Amino acid sequence: MFLTCINELANILESFGVHMKLIADDVKLYLQITNDTDVARLQCAIDALTDWTDEWQLSVSINKCCLLNIGRAICDTNLNINGSVLPTVAPVQDLGVSFIQNVSPLLMMMMMMKLPILASLKN
């Protein structure tokens, strides 16, 4: 039954051109954003996700949700879930893996060695 429900969610999100990854009870949405239309598509997909969770009487842990920009271009997005604006974070740790916006070899080495990251090292 659960797989049927999740497949439905995947189909809904695909209709917006948004990709989804599932890990246990976590859903990761991602989309390459190149313009405002892409931001609007992602917001529509997030709204569809919340509609789907409401329909199945599930809840979204909004305090665990965030945005991560990956790449050189930084997109100014004001995405939200039910009116709660999602914070943009960098770096973010998920399932023991650190994700950062721009992958600097020095920064990655410092993170792996758990050394303090100085603000002056940012590009």
Image: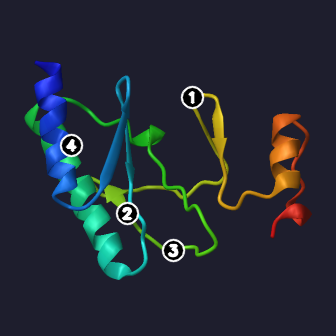
Report whether residue 57 is seen: no
46 to the left or right of 79: left
Which part of the image, by quadrant, shows the N terminus? top left
Q: Distance between the residues labelled 4 and 1?
A: 21 Å
- Residue 10 bears which disc, if any? 4
Residue identifier under label 1 = 95
Q: Mark 2 or 1 closer to N-term?
A: 2
Q: In this view, does 83 lie to the left or right of 102?
A: left
Q: Earlier in the sequence, mark 3 or mark 1?
A: 3
C-alpha separation, residue under disc 4 versus residue under disc 2: 20 Å
Image coordinates of residue 121 in percent, x first then y, are 89, 62
Q: Please report the residue visible at 20 percent of the width from the left and 29 percent of the height from the top.
A: 58
Q: Is residue 40 left or right of residue 34?
A: left
Q: Residue 31 carries which label?
A: none
- Residue drawn at x 58%, y 61% is 70
Does residue 54 appear left or right of residue 21 in this picture?
left
Query: Which amino acid is tagged 4?
Result: Ala
Q: Residue at x 26, y 32 (%)?
A: 59
Indicate which label's residue lies in the foreground, 4 or 1. 4
Q: Which amino acid does label 1 sit on?
A: Leu
Of the image marks 4 and 2, the number of the one nearer the N terminus: 4
Amino acid type assigned to the residue bearing label 3 in the image: Cys
Label 4 SS: helix
Residue 29 on image: x %, y %: 37, 49
Check whether the beta carbons of the residues at disc 4 and disc 1 lie within 8 A of each other. Answer: no
Query: Does residue 10 lie above or below 33 as drawn?
Result: above
Residue occupied by mark 3: 75
Asked if the residue at tag 3 contacts the one at tag 2, i.e. Cβ–Cβ closer than 8 Å, the answer is no
Label 3 vs 4, first from the N-terminus? 4
Whether residue 68 is visible here, answered yes or no, is yes
**Label of residue 79 in the image:** 2
